[in-house]
């Protein structure tokens, strides 16, 4: 009997304590932000979106190899005569032209493992966290500044080069024979 | 106006009572019983028995009907098995029903009904309370004790553990 | 308001039947509007209360100012435009009927809410009894919904709901008796008149004696249980039963359940206000208040006071919801049968003794 | 008088149910509200982590370990890193060890805070969830300012760390700890939690004496972590098999004492975690206090360029995660990729104790018992 009353009183009292705790939050400032109007400050080293500075890329494919999920695709080709390849910011001369540099951001793990092997510091994680798209295909980001026509031209040029090489090889082997 | 409302509630009561007895789906029967109860409560209001009307809703709809629904819902396969009241002893039932109808009709038409003046509705609670606590106290208490006994008995039976 | 009512009572110069029909339609629409308006405010308020308690902002964008007060309207529009899904294996008739029964019960209670001394349920001798009796109708709709959904989780919700509402009606009725002992009448008008003594809040039944204070708390607890809110939200406990009896409902049908649930909060508020907080009687009678330009109209009208008091109770219920964990089914029954009912019975007896001692009978 | 004949009802809880903490599917046999039999069905989130790992270089597996138990990624990284370090014989500098302890314990704290919130939510209280998140957010901010990620860190590398702590980190951590449990005015988060949920009579009634797991059962079923300690068995790998530098700190193993009911009930599992939060905070404080005495150096200095453990070498390494013992079995074939990697995930083993604990309890209790195990489906299904 005594236990019963103690129990009831306990339930009542602890309920009051809980109500007091929640009541006191009336006077506490909100800890969240009104998102689209205000934004939380994101540290500069936040790992949100991969960005590539194409002008610095030498096409070494170190990042492609480092990626655990193979979301980076790099195609390189010999530079066309009209391409004027400037040296990177580290002063390395660019010998290959990166004709295709895509990152599938829908596959990216945001692990930043691709960032460290890069000799030119051209691939980086940026604090931009708003890159939602309406189509998954749009999340495949292309960093090489070429149009499809351009790329086709380059491919044709590359194939021509290859053919030339093959022809040369054939000539060579013939000569050997 | 009042007649129209009366007809409305009377129709509700009778039709839903019909569903209760003739529906092949038990759950429909139980739910239409609610309409019957409410209709009856409304009819009580027409008889200026507002306390009884509300007690009807509170006790029958809020309590007993809910219990009925509870019981029906716990029976097995209520929706598939059709529980008919018609196939068993049909002849006898029709016979008895007709007999009852005849008897009732005979009584109704042969009784000289007392017809009083139409009086305005009066508060009934006080009168009911006074009667229950005064004139009919013994009956009231006996009824309560009986109900209490039934309650305790039900609890004992339900609580009995398997030996 | 009184003028409008008498206008309708005079029959508008139309045949009796038409006057009746028009009166019914107009008043039904008014009540519906009132419920809808209240629910819109209450949902917004609930979100704001929860936000304040949890250090958040809550809805902030929809609306004229920066507090998101139109958020509920936007949500309602969204809800109305949702696809109306009736799953194939449900019992179609009952499935469709259930939300309307739940809502009708709430609607009928609202029709009886006394916004002033001349409201019908105020003059009606059994006003309070009417409110209590009709509010028990909704449970049928809940059971119907739970059974018709053909979903085991819904059925669980319905069964819990039945057990809960049937149990908690008893303490409510018993507390009613304790109050009626003072007022000597079931009439709302009488009850409020007994409390409106001129001593302000000290005339309220809440402060008449210590037992009445406890009774008020018990009534609040039982009322919270009656309308299925935390800590008694077992019929729709979302961490256990997903959404309980309305799991299968979408769109407009769900909205009806939602409306009824919030409207029931208001009903509990009104009941508590009538029983313990002086109903539509003002907190203090100061004639000068009525002379304040706009607010005076509010202070002068009796509807303002009862809505204010009911809203207070509604906010307290919200406060409960965002503070407490939920009870288990057996604990719920324990609370009803072994705590609330003995306590209310004791209160009735003690009340009688008190009244005898102080010669109040 | 015989009992009324009742019939079992089979009811599917999940895979989409609000309180299965993910895509867990429980087939419940119920008798009224009482659950008589439970069959957990898992695998909805299976991502072939182990097979993936065989096709990746050792350092590339680290981001994958993040994604198993995504609530405590730091601890996963750490355990995996320690396993590979032992396999390949990599020495880790002392400074790195200190930072690892700090981050591991911070993550344990974050994980338990989430447990606190989710457990409150399971019991029907909404507000603890948000309070737990509020505190956890502060920890995530610390992580973000250090390594740039909030949930999947890839922070603890084999042989080192990806970043050094930024300036201001230590002060901020002290501030957090202060707000969390050290404040003198009684307004710290832990006291608030205690008042709001732990002390609440409804909460105690819901949890005390519910879902009792005995010590023998726990050991036989392979239950580890707080669920094991709640049975009164002080088994914490940080104390019993000290790895890293845990032997340098002064702290206690939280054990279930049956304060409100019997030993090993829901309440004990909850209280053990609450106590562990305090202990973790103590550990972090000690590590931070001792940090200036350690020589600061580049955290990546010991990271090996290429990891090629000797052929045929195998190892099993286990460490104490917030959810229990996380073990990694790794076999090397001499290549830069593991030949076989097996993960012993604590949540998986703990879940297997659910039927033993929850059968015979009510549906509402089942939810609480499941919540008290604090499972993460990402780790169970891998």
Image: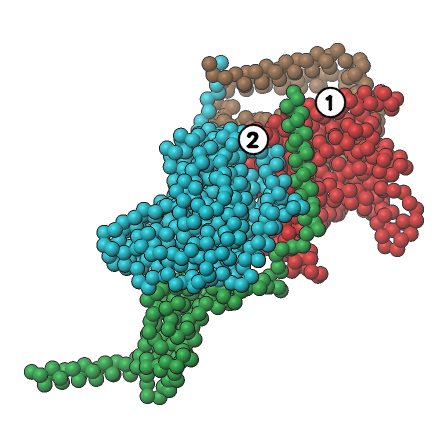
Chain colours: A green, B brown, C red, D cyan
Q: Which mark is residue D260?
A: 2
At 53% across and 47% down in the image, what residue appears? D281
* Residue A27, image x, y percentages: 71, 51
CA gap, disc 2 and disc 1? 30 Å
Residue for point 33% across, 56% down? D90
* Crowd tier of the residue under label 2, counting other residues whose Cα lies within 10 Å: few below 14, some 14–19, many 20 or above: some
Q: Depth check: give the residue in front, C116 or A32.
A: A32
Whether residue C151 appears in this view of the structure is no
The answer to whether residue A132 is left or right of residue C58 is left
Left/right of residue D332 with respect to residue D22 in the rendered view = left
The numbered mark 2 sits on a residue in which chain?
A: D
Residue mark closest to the camera, 2 vs 1: 2
Whole-percent x, y for residue B4 in the image: 73, 36
For disc 1, the marked residue is C346
Where on the picture, by quarter, is residue B128? top right
| 2 and 1 marks in contact (CB < 8 Å) | no
Q: Position of residue A134 (x, y in %)?
A: 48, 65
Quadrant holding the N terminus of chain A: top right
| Other residues around mark 1 within 10 Å, as few (<14) / some (14–19) / many (≥20) | few
Report in which chain the residue with disc 1 lies.
C
On the question of residue C181 being in view, the answer is yes
Element carrying mark 1: helix
């Amino acid at each position: 009997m005594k236990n019963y009353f103690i129990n009831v009183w306990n339930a009542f009292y602890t309920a009051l304590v809980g109500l007091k705790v929640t009541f006191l939050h009336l006077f506490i400032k909100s800890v969240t932000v009104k998102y689209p109007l205000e934004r939380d400050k994101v540290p500069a080293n936040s790992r949100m979106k991969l960005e590539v500075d194409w002008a610095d890329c030498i096409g070494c494919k170190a990042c492609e190899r480092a990626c655990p999920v193979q979301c980076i695709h790099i195609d390189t080709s010999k530079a066309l005569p009209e391409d004027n390849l400037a040296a990177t910011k580290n002063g390395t001369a660019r010998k290959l032209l990166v004709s295709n540099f895509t990152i599938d951001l829908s596959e990216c793990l945001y692990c930043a493992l691709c960032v460290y092997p890069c000799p030119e510091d051209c691939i980086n994680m940026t604090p931009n966290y708003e890159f939602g798209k309406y189509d998954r295909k749009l999340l495949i980001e292309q960093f090489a500044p070429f149009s499809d026509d351009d790329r086709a031209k380059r491919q044709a040029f590359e194939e021509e080069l290859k053919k030339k090489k093959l022809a040369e090889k054939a000539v060579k082997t013939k000569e050997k024979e | 106006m009042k007649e129209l409302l009366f007809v409305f509630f009377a129709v509700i009561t009778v039709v839903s009572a019909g569903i209760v007895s003739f529906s092949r789906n038990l759950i429909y029967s139980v739910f239409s019983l609610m309409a019957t109860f409410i209709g009856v409560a409304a009819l009580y209001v027409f008889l200026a028995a507002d306390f009884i009307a509300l007690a009807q809703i509170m006790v029958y709809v809020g309590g007993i009907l809910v219990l009925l629904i509870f019981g029906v819902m716990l029976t097995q396969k209520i929706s598939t098995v059709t529980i008919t009241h018609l196939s068993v002893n049909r002849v006898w039932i029709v016979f008895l029903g007709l007999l009852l109808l005849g008897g009732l009709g005979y009584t109704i038409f042969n009784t000289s009904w007392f017809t009083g003046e139409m009086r305005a509705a009066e508060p009934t609670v006080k009168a009911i309370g006074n009667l229950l606590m005064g004139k009919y106290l013994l009956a009231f208490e006996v009824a309560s004790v009986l109900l209490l006994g039934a309650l305790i008995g039900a609890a004992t039976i339900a609580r009995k553990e398997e030996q | 308001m009184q003028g409008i009512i008498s206008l309708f009572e005079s029959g508008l110069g139309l045949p009796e039947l038409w006057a009746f029909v028009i009166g019914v339609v107009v008043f039904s629409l008014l009540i519906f509007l009132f419920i809808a308006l209240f629910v819109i405010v209450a949902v917004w308020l609930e979100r704001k209360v929860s936000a304040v308690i949890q250090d958040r902002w809550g809805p902030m964008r929809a609306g004229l100012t920066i507090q998101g007060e139109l958020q509920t309207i936007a949500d309602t529009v969204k809800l109305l435009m949702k696809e109306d899904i009736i799953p194939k294996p449900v019992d179609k008739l009952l499935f469709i009927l259930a939300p309307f029964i739940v809502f009708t019960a709430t609607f009928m209670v609202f029709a009886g809410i006394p916004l002033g001394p001349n409201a019908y349920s105020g003059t009606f001798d059994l006003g309070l009894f009417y409110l209590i009796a009709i509010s028990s109708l909704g449970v049928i709709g809940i059971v119907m919904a739970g059974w018709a959904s053909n979903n085991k989780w819904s059925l669980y919700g319905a069964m819990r709901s039945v057990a809960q509402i049937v149990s908690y009606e008893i303490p409510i009725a018993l507390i009613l008796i304790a109050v009626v002992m003072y007022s000597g009448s079931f009439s709302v008008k009488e009850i409020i008149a007994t409390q409106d003594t001129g001593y302000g809040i000290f005339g309220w039944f809440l402060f008449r004696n210590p037992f009445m204070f406890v009774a008020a708390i018990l009534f609040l607890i039982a009322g919270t249980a009656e309308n299925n809110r935390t800590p008694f939200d077992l019929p729709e406990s979302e961490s256990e039963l997903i959404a309980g009896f309305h799991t299968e409902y979408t769109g407009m049908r769900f909205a009806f359940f939602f409306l009824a649930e919030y409207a029931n909060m208001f009903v509990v508020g009104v009941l508590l206000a009538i029983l313990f907080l002086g109903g539509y009687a003002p907190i203090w009678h100061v004639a000068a208040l009525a002379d304040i330009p706009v607010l005076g109209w509010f202070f002068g009208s009796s509807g303002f006071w009862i809505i204010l008091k009911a809203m207070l109770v509604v906010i307290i219920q919200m406060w409960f919801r965002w503070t407490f964990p939920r009870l288990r089914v057996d604990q719920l029954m324990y609370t009803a049968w072994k705590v609330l009912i003995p306590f209310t019975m004791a209160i009735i007896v003690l009340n009688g003794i008190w009244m005898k001692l102080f010669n109040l009978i | 008088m015989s009992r009324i004949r009742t019939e079992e009802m089979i009811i599917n809880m999940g895979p989409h149910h609000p309180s299965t903490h993910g895509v867990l599917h429980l087939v419940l046999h119920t008798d009224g509200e009482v659950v008589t039999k439970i069959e957990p069905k898992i695998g909805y989130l299976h991502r072939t982590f182990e097979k993936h790992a065989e096709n990746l270089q050792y350092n590339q597996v680290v981001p994958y370990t993040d994604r198993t138990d995504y609530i405590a990624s730091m601890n996963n990284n750490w355990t995996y890193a320690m396993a590979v370090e032992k396999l390949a014989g990599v020495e880790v500098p002392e400074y790195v060890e200190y930072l690892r302890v700090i981050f591991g314990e911070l993550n344990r704290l974050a994980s338990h805070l989430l447990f606190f919130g989710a457990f409150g939510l399971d019991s029907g209280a909404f507000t603890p969830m948000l309070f737990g998140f509020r505190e956890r957010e502060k920890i995530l901010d610390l992580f973000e300012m250090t390594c740039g990620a909030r949930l999947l860190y890839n922070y603890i590398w084999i042989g080192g760390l990806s970043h050094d702590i930024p300036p201001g980190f230590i002060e901020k951590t002290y501030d957090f700890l202060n707000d969390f449990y050290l404040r003198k005015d009684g307004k710290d988060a832990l006291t608030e939690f205690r008042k709001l949920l732990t002390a609440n009579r409804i909460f105690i009634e819901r949890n005390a004496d519910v879902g009792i797991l005995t010590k023998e059962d726990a050991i036989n079923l392979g239950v580890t972590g707080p669920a094991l300690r709640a049975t009164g068995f002080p088994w914490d790998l940080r104390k019993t098999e000290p790895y890293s530098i845990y032997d340098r700190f002064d702290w206690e193993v939280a054990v279930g004492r049956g304060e409100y009911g019997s030993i090993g009930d829901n309440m004990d599992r909850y209280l053990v975690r609450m106590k562990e939060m305090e202990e973790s905070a103590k550990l972090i404080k000690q590590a931070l206090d001792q940090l200036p005495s350690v020589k600061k150096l580049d955290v990546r200095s010991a990271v090996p360029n290429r990891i090629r453990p000797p052929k045929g070498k195998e190892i099993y390494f286990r460490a104490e995660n917030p959810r229990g013992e996380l073990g990694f079995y790794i076999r090397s074939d001499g290549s830069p990729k593991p030949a076989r990697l097996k993960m012993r995930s604590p949540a998986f083993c703990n879940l297997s104790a659910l039927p033993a604990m929850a059968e015979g309890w009510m549906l509402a209790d089942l939810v609480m018992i499941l919540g008290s195990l604090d499972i993460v489906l990402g780790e169970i299904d891998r």
